[in-house]
Amino acid sequence: MNTDFHRPTAKIYTFPVGGRAGQAARAAAPAAAPQICTAGSGWYHEAAIQEEAERNRLPRGR
């Protein structure tokens, strides 16, 4: 029985200076300014209001 075998040890890695925060600061690209989006126009809502107003102006059942 062979009792003289050598087992390799674990590999030790060095961490970057500053940890994850230090690494992220170097790799971060400047963010672009957000684009402003303006949504308005509720034409379908306005059309429904106009339609209801016209219905109420017309005499009914005469």
Image (spheres, helix red, strand yellow):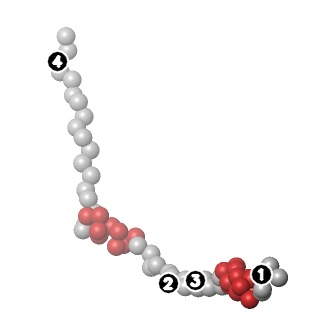
Element on which disc 4 rests: loop
Q: Is residue 1 above or below residue 23?
A: above
Label 3 with label 4: CB-CB less than 8 Å: no
Q: Nearer the viewer, residue 1 or 33?
A: 33
Q: Which mark is residue 37?
A: 3
The amino acid type found where label 2 is placed reads Ala
- What is the crowding at mark 1: few (fewer than 14 residues within 10 Å), some, or many (at least 20)? few
The amino acid type found where label 1 is placed reads Arg
Could you tell me how far apart the alpha carbons at marks 4 and 1 are, in whole angstroms? 107 Å
Element on which disc 3 rests: loop
Which residue position holds label 2? 33
Could you tell me how far apart the alpha carbons at marks 2 and 3 are, in whole angstroms? 13 Å
Q: Give whichever of discs 4 and 1 has the lower sequence position.
A: 4
Observer-side mark, 2 or 4, equals 2
- In the image, farthest residue toward the front: 62
Q: Quadrant of the N terminus?
A: top left
Q: Is residue 23 above or below residue 54?
A: above
- What is the crowding at mark 2: few (fewer than 14 residues within 10 Å), some, or many (at least 20)? few
